[in-house]
Amino acid sequence: MTSPTISLHDAMFLYSWHWQGQFSGTIQFLPDGSIKKDFQEQNWLKWEFSKDASSILVRGRDGKITLQFNPDRTGFSGPAWNPKNKITGNRLQRLAPSSHPSEKPVAKTAPVPGMRNNDSLSRIEVIKDQGPNAAEWALTPLDRPIPAGIRQNLTYLREDLLDEASKAPKASPAAYTQASEYCDKLLAAFSQREIARVQAGYRATQADANQATSTQALDARRNHPMSWPQFAREESQRAALRESEADKADVKKQRIKVEWTTRAAQMRRILDDHYRQFREAMRLAHSSPAC
């Protein structure tokens, strides 16, 4: 029976996979961009999401390959580095929670995208319960996709919150003011993340485009009656050059992620402080004799 469709992010991180190509075995995709495998295959080094997050790119010393997942996220396929070959894969067993760090945060923050539809709670109670989870989504790493519509839901929730404050308040005016400002700061954080994500995509593409494929010294040694030992030596040197250039590009991409992590840490302190002020306003409202 076909499994229900899940997001590409969840399918990749919550399951192990069987890899079939020139080498075959079991692999795991890790959030830091590395790949854990149980077989010796040295050509591939890192993975990353494609720009539309519908497939992944696997980088090796010989360049990049694209692996396209099927709609129900139970398998993938794509060309190998050698054009004559093909790579396929199928999803294996679900990983235990302790074996992968990405599972717990996903479960924790899952309610946020639909939080506006929770009619059993007042809007200010929704902010109280789901505000920190929304902050986790806003500050999540750039290579991790966020739920579609979460920013729109947060905008609607802020407006519903203001309506509740004017028509049927469940807390003090100060609490509603703090809650509204907290929503504004969350929306600003989402905007900053989107800007950083676009900049990271541009700089990553630029880093790939700037990789050198030859050097003046290599080209100067070329001649038409090249012997096989000369050719083999040149191919080895060019392979080493490609690997070195790929490593440099990876360093530039990691620098982008570090910059966002640093900025996210600064925004987290601001958001945590404002959420603390909001909760304090809620406590003061409940402790007031007028309430």
Image (cartoon, rainbow, N blue to C red):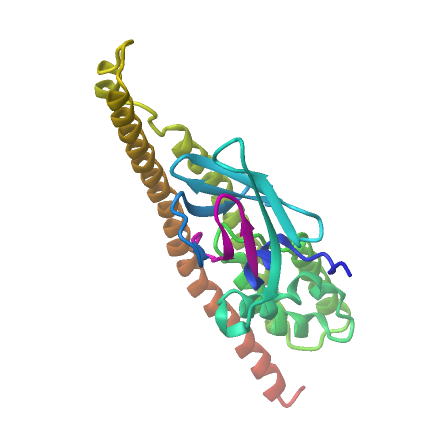
Image point (72%, 56%), residue name: 5
User: Residue 76: where, in percent of width, then height?
Assistant: 62, 47
> Could you tell me which quadrant the C terminus lies in?
bottom right
Does the rendering let one see residue 51? Answer: no
User: Residue 164: where, in percent of width, then height?
Assistant: 74, 68
Determine whether 187 is above or below 228 in the image. Answer: below
User: Residue 194: where, in percent of width, then height?
Assistant: 54, 46
Q: Is residue 67 magenta?
A: no
| Among the 4 quarters of the image, the one containing residue 266 | bottom left
Q: How many marks?
A: 0
Image point (28%, 31%), residue name: 236
Q: Residue furthest bottom?
A: 289
Could you tell whether 62 is left or right of 135 in the image?
left
Determine whether 169 is above or below 216 in the image. Answer: below
| Among the 4 quarters of the image, the one containing residue 214 | top left
Q: Is residue 22 magenta?
A: yes
Image point (59%, 44%), residue name: 55
Does the rendering let one see residue 288? Answer: yes
> Could you tell me which quadrant the N terminus lies in?
bottom right
User: Residue 31: where, in percent of width, then height?
Assistant: 47, 57
Q: Residue 25 versus residue 229: which sits nearer the camera?
A: 229
Q: Residue 20 versus residue 132: which sits nearer the camera?
A: 20
Image point (59%, 79%), residue name: 282
Q: Residue furthest front?
A: 228
Q: Residue 256 versus residue 27: which sits nearer the camera?
A: 27
Could you tell whether 250 is left or right of 197 in the image?
left
Instruction: Report the magenta residues as a range.
Output: 16-34
